């Protein structure tokens, strides 16, 4: 087990591993673990700090400051701006998300195989890789009843005859016998990262890769170490590099390194709109487990679900209705946040000279805006069926809905300036496949035109997953690194 602090004498150019993995989120942690367990010398770099899972309450202000990039404030610019979030800590996005877990729909994989010429990507071919990841990070359904703010959505769907499912989570629900704690989240810092370290892997946190160069058959990772009193620049060399920094940071790094073909041109995301529903009775009980139901009736156009609805989150979601801010303090136990999430939206990622952060530009086409508007109306419909007495869209200028009849007051489409959408799932900025006209990497993640340079994160996914993508990212990363090991490519 090797944790390298920035002051450690080994945290320098003297490290010469077989493999460097840049990023410790779901793709990076799975990749690094498999390489280490295959007997390779592996160094995993993480820009953010190495923190315990319980270093701050989940979804708290403290956690946002500790574990989110830019304290959760990242904007994709365009006619319709999109706010997005990224994890910036050991474990990446797995530390800050809710861990809802899906296998990739076969219809999605079929689109990727045909549209991008991706080899060996059927659901049957991915099944052993899902299973291998699930053997390390447990995936479980709730052992008992779901929280009320989740079951209300399910009840509303049943009344309308819509398809609703309980989604399993990367979570071990078994109570700790000593503490009585209701189980543990199965984030990367709890599962794959400890396994990686046990296999002899080296982890260096607070270290940001800034450029890659290649000479004499080896890659040099130029990096900035931030975790000490005096930040410094270092260079690390390895035969093989896996870039797993996320769908925004990975193309930023590759483009800064002069690797630009089909890199950062095809960012996709799941744009999301939220509402606050007010009920006649209390349903938002402190200490409840997280909501797990999603409505899949309208997939792949859009799906619906319930967000974490703590009082600060409710106040933020109600910002479009400032007259209700005092009511949040008084009635928050009768309120919950719900969302509709579509598959529209495109973007580009660019690196600009002199700027530390990437420039992300996004676009929502008129058809995307109309789809979200339709999804918003359907979401209000199911919430009234669930017993809501009022629905407050989190969109400035939108009316408060107090009955089914009020849904007719909603515009048939969204104005780009009003969209007020967010995105939690980003992917597809460096798609994989054999189609040389659109793919950045081959079917197993090796960057086209390079030797021993791989991508191992959501960047590789060829388009929207429709469902939460973390399971897909882990399975694809496992598939790709196992192929690299079998082919002796590392």
Image (spheres, rainbow, N blue to C red):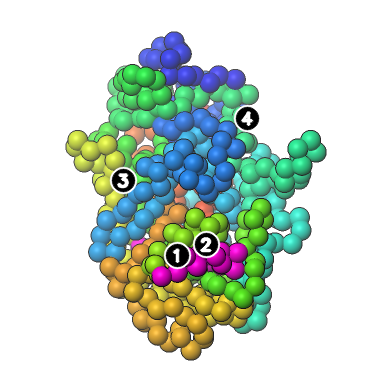
The residue beneath circle 3 is: 263
Picture disc at residue 325 = 1
Q: Nearer the viewer, mark 4 or mark 3?
A: 4
Rendered view: 406 above or below 488 = below
Question: Is disc 1 placed on a helix, strand or loop?
Answer: helix
Residue drawn at point x = 55 percent, y = 23 percent = 201
Farthest-out residue, right: 177
Q: Nearer the viewer, mark 2 or mark 3?
A: 2
Cβ atoms under marks 2 and 4 closer than 8 Å? no
Choose between 137 and 99: the one closer to the eye.
99
**For residue 398, what is the image quadrant?**
bottom left
Find the distance from the CA under tag 2 to the CA under tag 4: 44 Å
Picture disc at residue 329 = 2
Question: Is disc 4 placed on a helix, strand or loop?
Answer: helix
Rendered view: 194 above or below 146 = above
Find the distance from the CA under tag 1 to the CA under tag 3: 43 Å
Which numbered disc flags the more N-terminal residue, 2 or 3?
Answer: 3
Which numbered disc flags the more N-terminal residue, 1 or 3?
Answer: 3
């Amino acid at each position: 087990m090797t944790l390298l602090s920035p002051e450690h004498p080994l945290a320098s150019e003297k490290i010469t591993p077989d493999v460097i993995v840049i990023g410790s989120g779901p793709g990076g942690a799975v990749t690094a673990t498999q390489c280490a367990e295959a007997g390779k010398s592996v160094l995993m770099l993480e820009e953010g700090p190495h923190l315990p899972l319980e270093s701050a309450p989940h979804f708290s202000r403290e956690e946002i400051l500790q574990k989110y990039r830019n304290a959760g404030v990242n904007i994709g610019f365009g006619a319709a701006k999109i706010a997005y979030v990224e994890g910036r800590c050991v474990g990446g996005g797995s530390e800050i998300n809710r861990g809802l877990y899906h296998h990739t729909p076969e219809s999605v994989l079929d689109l990727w195989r045909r549209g991008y010429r991706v080899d060996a990507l059927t659901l049957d071919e991915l099944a052993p890789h899902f299973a291998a990841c699930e053997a390390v990070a447990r995936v479980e359904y709730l052992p008992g009843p779901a929280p009320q703010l989740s079951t209300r959505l399910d009840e509303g769907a049943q009344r309308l005859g819509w398809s609703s499912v309980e989604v399993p989570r990367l979570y071990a629900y078994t109570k700790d016998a000593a503490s009585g704690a209701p189980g543990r989240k199965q984030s990367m810092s709890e599962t794959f990262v400890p396994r990686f370290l046990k296999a002899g892997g080296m982890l260096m946190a607070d270290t940001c890769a800034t450029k890659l160069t290649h000479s004499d058959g080896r890659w040099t990772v130029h990096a900035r170490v931030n975790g000490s009193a005096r930040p410094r620049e270092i260079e690390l060399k390895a035969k093989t590099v896996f870039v797993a920094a996320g769908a925004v940071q990975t193309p930023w790094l590759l483009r800064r390194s002069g690797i630009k073909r089909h890199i950062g041109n095809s960012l996709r995301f799941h744009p999301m709109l939220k509402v606050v529903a007010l009920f006649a009775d209390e349903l938002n009980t402190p200490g409840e487990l997280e909501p797990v139901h999603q409505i899949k009736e309208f997939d792949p156009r859009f799906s619906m679900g319930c967000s974490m609805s703590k009082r600060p989150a409710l106040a933020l979601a109600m910002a479009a209705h400032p007259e209700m801010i005092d009511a949040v303090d008084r009635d928050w136990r009768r309120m919950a946040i719900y969302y509709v999430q579509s598959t529209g939206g495109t973007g580009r990622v660019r690196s600009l000279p002199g700027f530390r952060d990437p420039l992300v530009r996004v676009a929502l086409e008129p058809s995307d805006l109309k789809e979200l508007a339709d999804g918003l109306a359907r979401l209000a419909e199911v919430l009234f069926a669930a017993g809501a007495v009022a629905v407050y869209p989190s969109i400035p200028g939108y009316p408060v809905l107090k009955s089914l009849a009020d849904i007719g007051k909603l515009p048939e489409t969204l104005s780009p300036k009003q969209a007020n959408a967010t995105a939690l799932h980003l992917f597809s900025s460096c798609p994989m496949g054999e189609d040389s006209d659109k793919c950045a990497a081959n079917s197993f993640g090796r960057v086209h035109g390079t030797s021993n340079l791989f991508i191992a994160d959501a960047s590789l996914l060829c388009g929207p997953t429709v469902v939460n993508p973390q399971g897909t990212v882990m399975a694809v990363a496992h598939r790709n690194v196992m192929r690299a090991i079998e082919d002796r490519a590392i």
